[in-house]
């Protein structure tokens, strides 16, 4: 029995580590979502480059390419990647990301999509994910990255909310009154990914966790895609987050509007903040939309977000800024731990 324990313990310890670990301080992260690759004259890449971020995070709908044609998918990614200022971003800034539905391949889609493995390969090709990256050898596109610097350690976790997600039905589909039907027993992540996520959140020595989800986690009142359409999965996630022993924030996209949400979870020492950034170049028309957790105003114009991390004795102070065209400041928020 003692010999068996000796063999198992190294495996458990390794499983808690990120897929990729770098010795590097993160002091500024930029992120965004929902970029129509064909709108060549309406891109924000020069504005993003002006922030001189250490890292850019795609939060989904990185292209709009619904369907099962992978030749077209690659063409759409190539067009997005070919934009001159995006090429400049790739030269100067590390880029990571996860998909949502329109780059996954089907609007509001889940595990039923027949080309999800082929689509994953096209996503990873676009993101230049290394051939030896652990995410390439497992089902789903989820990934994690740890940046262990002298000032502090940041862990970024990018769950896949498409590949394993159970079906989602809609009332009034195809109309302006379309509304998601709650899937009372459905799941989002799948059991293997849940176990992976729990291991990632248990890594010791992390000073700030960042989870980037393609769909919103905290807002629960609007009628579109969101974690609360799957209440069992959302409850399981919140329970998991309550056990984290460091500051944690959520990033999300999808909505074609940007907003900040904040909530408290029983058992967790800090408020949980969610920063939604959408869309890079196809924002929605301004409208009323309930969100009891919203802090400040909504943004209904093309935007991205920049998160500045100021380290004081391994404690992060976060300064969030939403930028629009010509780097106009649209919204700011400071979070002090």
Image (spheres, rainbow, N blue to C red):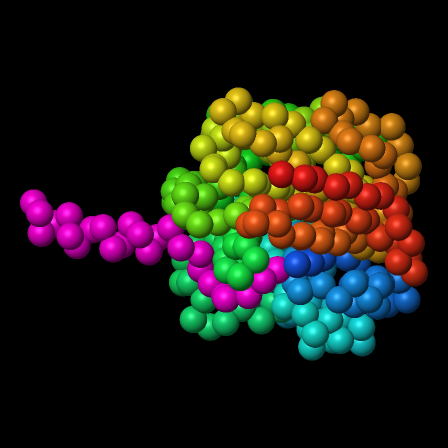
Q: Position of residue 242 (x, y in %)?
A: 49, 30
The reply to whether the magenta stretch includes residue 39 is no
Q: Position of residue 2 (x, y in %)?
A: 8, 47
Q: Which residues are magenta?
A: 1-26
Is residue 331 something one can see in this rendering? yes
7 relative to 148 in the view: left or right: left
Q: Position of residue 66 (x, y in %)?
A: 68, 55
Q: Nearer the viewer, residue 122 or 28?
A: 28
Quick one: quadrant of the N terminus? top left
283 relative to 166 in the view: left or right: right
19 relative to 99 in the view: left or right: left
Q: Nearer the viewer, residue 172 or 303?
A: 303
Is residue 211 something one can see in this rendering? no
The reply to whether the magenta stretch includes residue 9 is yes
Is residue 99 depicted above or below 221 in this figure? below
Q: Position of residue 23 (x, y in %)?
A: 50, 66
- Among all residues in the image, which is located at the extreme front? 313
Q: Nearer the viewer, residue 15 or 234?
A: 15
Quick one: quadrant of the C terminus? top right
Residue 197 image-quadrant placement: top left
């Amino acid at each position: 029995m003692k010999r068996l324990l000796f063999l198992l313990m190294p495996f458990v310890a390794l499983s808690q580590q990120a897929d990729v670990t770098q010795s590097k301080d993160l002091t500024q992260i930029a992120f965004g979502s929902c970029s129509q690759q064909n709108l060549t004259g309406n891109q924000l890449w020069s504005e993003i480059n002006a922030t001189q971020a250490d890292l850019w995070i795609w939060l989904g709908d990185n292209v709009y390419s619904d369907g099962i044609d992978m030749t077209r998918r690659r063409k759409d990614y190539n067009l997005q990647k070919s934009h001159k200022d995006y090429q400049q971003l790739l030269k100067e800034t590390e880029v990571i990301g996860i998909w949502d539905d329109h780059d996954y391949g089907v609007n509001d889609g889940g595990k039923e999509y027949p080309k999800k493995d082929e689509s994953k390969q096209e996503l990873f090709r676009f993101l230049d994910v290394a051939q030896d990256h652990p995410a390439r050898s497992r089902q789903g596109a989820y990934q994690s990255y740890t940046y262990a610097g002298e000032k502090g350690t940041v862990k970024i976790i990018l769950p896949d909310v498409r590949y394993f997600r159970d079906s989602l039905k809609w009332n009034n589909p195809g109309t302006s009154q379309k509304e998601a039907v709650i899937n009372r027993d459905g799941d989002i992540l799948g059991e293997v990914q849940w176990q992976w996520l729990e291991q990632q959140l248990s890594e010791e020595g992390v000073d700030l966790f960042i989870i980037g989800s393609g769909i919103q986690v905290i807002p629960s009142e609007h009628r579109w895609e969101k974690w609360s359409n799957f209440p069992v999965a959302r409850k399981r996630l919140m329970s998991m987050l309550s056990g984290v022993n460091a500051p944690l924030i959520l990033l999300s996209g999808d909505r074609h509007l940007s907003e900040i949400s904040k909530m408290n979870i029983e058992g967790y020492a800090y408020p949980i903040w969610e920063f939604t950034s959408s869309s890079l170049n196809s924002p929605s028309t301004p409208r009323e939309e309930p969100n009891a957790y919203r802090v400040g105003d909504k943004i209904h114009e093309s935007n991205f977000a920049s998160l500045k991390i100021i380290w004081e004795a391994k404690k992060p102070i976060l300064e969030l800024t939403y930028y629009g065209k010509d780097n106009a400041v649209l919204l700011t928020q400071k979070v002090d731990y």
